[in-house]
Image (tube, rainbow, N blue to C red):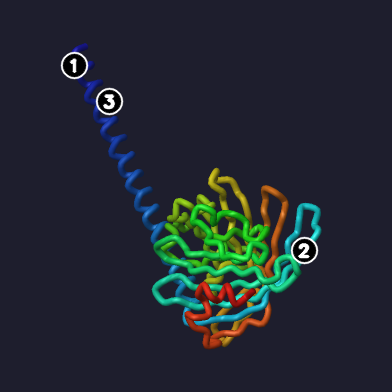
Amino acid sequence: MLYQGRLKTVLITTLLAAASLSSFAVSQQETDQEKNARRKGLDISVEVKNRDSGWGDSKADMLMILRNEQGQESVREIKIKSLEQLGDGDKSLTVFNKPKDVKGSAFLSYSHAEKADDQWLYLPSLKRVKRISSRNKSGPFMGSEFSFEDFSSFEVEKYSYKYLGNEKIAAKDFFKVEQFPVDENSGYTRRVVWIDQQEYLVHKIDYYDRKNSLLKTLTYVDYQQYSGKFWRARSMQMINHQNGKSTELIWNNYTFNNGLSEGDFNRNALKRTR
């Protein structure tokens, strides 16, 4: 009986050791898979950024269409200028021309790769330039379903990444990548992005709020190519799933390499819109 008891103890110990080794192997395998997913998500996102480089500067006209839960619309006419920055985020100036209640309002944004963006808003009713705090960038931009954060240029360093797999939508192949904001003041815990495998263009983004609930979906529609290289969506449609509202941006009259300079994007540029 004593021999049988010892044999049973050895057998149990051996099984536990084998189970532990098996568990370690599975854990190691999962770790390797996670590393590969992070690396592939990063590589795809780097390619997205690289393919949209070299445009220098741009100008465009934009219609911002705000729709409430009942589908009622209000339309704003906007002009946007952007300046590409090498080694950092891009600069942009957004000026509202119509309707009368927002005419002259202007928004200046300096996106950054590794620190908080610098953003300023000029409202004619206040007759002063207001700096947007990094803690407030998750707030709505001019009453739309876009936040101040959404108007920042995409920079690879702003996120960590996870490749989620491939997906076919309407006979088109997409990469599906999860992006986690590095900035603790971001209004999002994560974004899930669909990127087409041919041109590496973003076609859809799901935004998850700080409670990790689906907040918004942005869809890019009708991509057009400019100068034989640069792709821009003619329409960007943001739907807020939590309040039933939506905002559509319709872009027209894109031009590139207009000779814009840093002087077109300083604080005085906000004053010149008055």
Quarter of the rendering containing residue 97 = bottom right
* Numbered badge on residue 157: none
Q: Would you place residue 38 above or below residue 256 in this image?
A: above
Locate the N terminus and report the quarter of the image it occupies: top left
Mark 2, residue position: 74
- The residue tagged with tag 3: helix, strand or loop? helix
Left or right of 37 on screen, residue 199: right
How many residues crowd mark 2 within 10 Å: few (<14), some (14–19), many (20+)? Answer: few
Q: Which label's residue is closer to the chain start, 3 or 1?
A: 1
Q: Closest to the observer: 207 or 168? A: 207
Q: Nearer the viewer, residue 55 or 167?
A: 55
Q: Position of residue 118 (x, y in %)?
A: 48, 64
- The amino acid at mark 2 is Ser
In x, y percent, where is residue 31?
35, 49
Asked whether 232 or 118 is in front, the reply is 118
What's the residue type where badge 1 is placed?
Tyr
Q: Residue at x 65, y 61 (%)?
A: 142
Q: Kindly identify which residue carries mark 3.
A: 12
Q: Are marks 2 and 1 in contact (CB under 8 Å)?
A: no
For this orientation, the residue located farthest to the front is: 127
Considering only vertical position in the picture, is 56 above or below 245? below
Q: Is residue 142 above or below residue 103?
A: above
Instruction: Using residue 15 as the reference point, say whether residue 40 is left or right of it.
Output: right
Residue at 29 percent across and 30 percent down: it is 16
Residue at point 41% right, 63% down?
157
For disc 1, the marked residue is 3
